[in-house]
Amino acid sequence: MLFASVTLAALAVLLAWPVPVLLAKAHWPTRSPGIALLLWQAIAISGGLSMIGSLVTFGLIPFGGSLLQGLAQLPQLLAEGPLPAGTGLIHIFALSSAALLAAHLVLNLIVTVTRTERQRRRHRSLVELLSTPLPDRPGAPIHIIDSPAPVAYCLPGARTVTVLSEGLVALLDPPQLEAVIAHERAHLRQQHHILLVAFQSWRSSLPWFPIATRAQVAVSLLVEILADDQSRRHTDAETLAGAIALVGSAETNALTTNATQFVESSAALASERSAVSMRVDRLAHPEPQLPLAERVLILVAAAVLLAVPLVLLLAS
């Protein structure tokens, strides 16, 4: 089990820093965003399993010759004693840390999902109360809110709603507005909110962990790119790029009108500008998706990342 613990620890370190950094800086994810999202999920799951698994396998070394044997004997030995010879504080610390980390991640995910769903229900109720439905529209309902800011977003759930602001309707011409609606409906259709909540939970669970923040930013951009690609099936790239540029410019101007808010949000504003510029440039200068061989190779790498910690744990 010592070999498994050391190997899992090394994998956890790789997936905690160099691998996500390289992926976040790579250019290819914008060419195949769906494949990149699968790889990000594999990194997150494998990294979590490796961290917890490394602690568990190390802590169980005195309790048996294998992981399953140690797990079977652990409750009885802890309850009745005596602990096996060679059990030290470091082993107890490792097991306690693994239990606390696993509980922290699971509970934080439950809290994040519950809080997000409660906020969505409350927001949906307010939207339905204070907005005007857009009539004669097929598909999910569209509501118009009275706001001068150019806003467009979707509310997933049992009753999905697409929300537009009067400022957005006034800013865009009809083809651009249709492109934005198609973009928002793509988010709903592809269930992007589930992925975003998972990475939001990872970030809030490990706020001191820079990679969690980097992963959330990268995943948020990739789901926007995926929605852009879906929207392009209903409109042309030039129309969609124009809508994104107009909305992004209007949001930036609205933010900079308040000097205090601008200072406090300068980092977020720079990130938003970069994302908008990248999306517009990608639409204006489209690149082909990755060749099939490279896509298959990345999918195999994602599968290997998921399999390695499981194999090490079962074989230990």
Image (cartoon, rainbow, N blue to C red):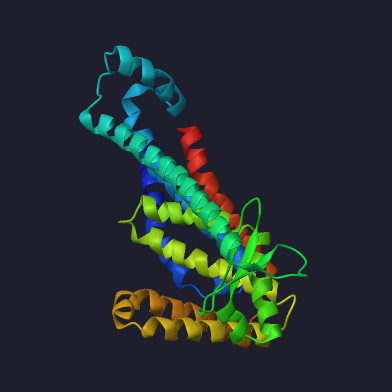
From this view, report whether residue 128 is shown above or below residue 309.
below
From this view, report whether residue 46 is shown above or below residue 153.
above
Is 11 in front, or is 169?
A: 169
Residue depicted at 57% across the width and 57% down the height: 124
Residue 133 in percent (x, y) is at 67, 67
From this view, report whether residue 305 is shown above or below residue 110.
below
Residue, far left: 89
Whether residue 261 sits left or right of residue 145 in the image: it is: left
Residue depicted at 52% across the width and 50% down the height: 117
Whether residue 285 sits left or right of residue 77 in the image: it is: right
- Total number of numbered discs in the rendering: 0
Residue 194 in percent (x, y) is at 56, 54
Residue depicted at 65% across the width and 50% down the height: 158
Residue 259 visible, this angle:
yes
Whether residue 236 sits left or right of residue 228 in the image: it is: right
Image quarter in which the N terminus is found: top left
Is 75 in front, or is 14?
A: 75
Quarter of the view holding residue 230:
bottom right
Residue depicted at 64% across the width and 61% down the height: 161
Is 126 in front, or is 304?
A: 126
Residue 32 visible, this angle:
no
Residue 100 in percent (x, y) is at 34, 37
Image quarter in which the C terminus is found: top left
